[in-house]
Image (cartoon, grey):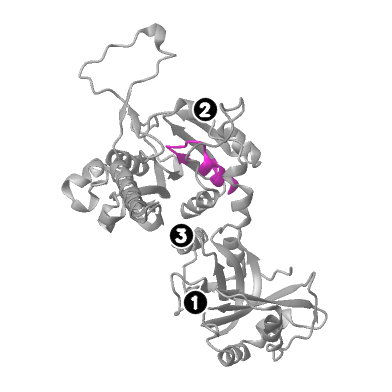
Amino acid sequence: MATCFTRPCLKYLLHLAQDHLEFRIPEIKALLALRAKPFNACENFKEKSPFVCLDGLSEEDVRWVMARSVCAKSAFELWGHGRTCAELQTSLSSYPSENMGPFMHKGSTYKINVYTFNKTLLFADRIKKIDALEFLPFEGSVSLKSPEHIFCLLEDYGTDPNNIPEHPDYMYFGRWIADGQRELIRSHSVKNRHFIGNTSMDAGLSFIMANHAKVHENHLVFDPFVGTGSLLVACSHFGAYVCGTDIDYNTIHGKGRSSRKNHMWRGPDENIRANLRQYGTERMYVDVMVSDASKSVWRKAALFDAIITDPPYGIRESTRRTGSHKDITKPLDVMYVESHVPVSQAYHLSDIFTDLLNFSAEHLVIGGRLVYWLPVYRPEYCDEVVPLHPCLRLISNCEQTLSSHTSRRLITMEKIKDPEELDSLAHLSDPRFSPYQGHNAFRQKYFSGLNKKSSKEDIKVDINGE
């Protein structure tokens, strides 16, 4: 395809995927921020719409965003739009001919596609819509197999599949620029990964988290609850050096029971490094080590460009830290130091997130981002539940529903200043920085909701006599 990077800033249309609805716009904003570009949506922008029109960008900016985004399907240079065919034609007629000319001259080849959202058109209807665009001054010849330029008519039939209108709510026409990176979701699927665990992060969400964190080439990224390293895989794909820690010795060393069906034990080369080797990014692997997230082993310095993690919630993975409830503990015999497994105790969610925010404030560079998952009990959720820190600015807060009564929020924060002596205790003097409270019983509430649901289903079965 011909590329023309010297053209002026125009309007561009992004066709967004309908999965991960909450994460789409924050991802686009983060990627634009990496290029120091603002997110300028047009006046008719709607959060849940599959289309978003952006202003003030160059074609190079759009191509760069699409080379990273897993939430956007395609991008187009917008030539015209309208609610009706007449409005669309008027809009196209007013588009500057000098912008159209380079793609419609004699000797060029092109084709026109028709995309519909929330409605399937018959082939004959698609042909009619393409024929209705004959007023456009195309001078080249049609090539369906290998055109130089691809143009698209996109029609939006709303978001209600039970009430599809006869005519589209809105129409767009433009020149195709690039596709997003949806293929990464398939190529990096956990199903085909060499080393997995019970809670390995979904590939799509891993790449979304990396984009929210503005992970870039030669960044150093850290995951304090690394598990099987799904987040490291995504970050290394974008050229970042990756490292992590976890309290679970067996997970870090790839030992113990396998999470795969019909496999009893993990193989000799099932580890995080092997995962990166599988995807050709082993050179970005720094290392992982067994460590307790509540007891930092790092020197006090701004070391990381991004911290990306999925802390345990106490549902499928236990929340543990080293320590003992005993007032007096027996000193360890020197001869057993190397083989010693420390005693562990419960690590409450409020402590996990307080420690995580304090650690990030200490070890992120200025402008570096913290991206993590926060589990919440939906009936009790409000924005005040999200823990804050005086050194970190909240960038986005996106919900992923887990059940009717639970969800988790993808929290993105950015470091705005270095910590001062009392910043770690700011929650004592300022209620805005109160720690994560009221959800320490998340495990009990999670299973309580499941039990209630099961009880209702049992009652229904009894009533029906089945």
Q: Residue furthest front?
A: 465
Magenta range is 222-241
Category of crowding for the residue at label 2, using alpha-carbon neighbours closer than 10 angstroms: few (below 14), some (14–19), many (at least 20): some
Q: Which residue is mark 3?
A: 23
Q: Toward the viewer: 329 or 41?
A: 329
Look at discs 1 and 3 and give the one toward the viewer.
Answer: 1
Q: Which residue is mark 2?
A: 257
Residue 240 in magenta? Answer: yes
Q: Position of residue 111 (x, y in %)?
A: 74, 77
How far is the residue under mark 2 from the one under mark 3?
A: 34 Å
Q: Which residue is mark 1?
A: 158
Q: Position of residue 360 (x, y in %)?
A: 37, 43
For the residue marked with disc 1, what is the amino acid?
Answer: Gly
* Element marked by disc 1: loop
Residue 159 in magenta? Answer: no
Residue 234 seen in render:
yes
How far is the residue under mark 2 from the one under mark 1?
A: 48 Å
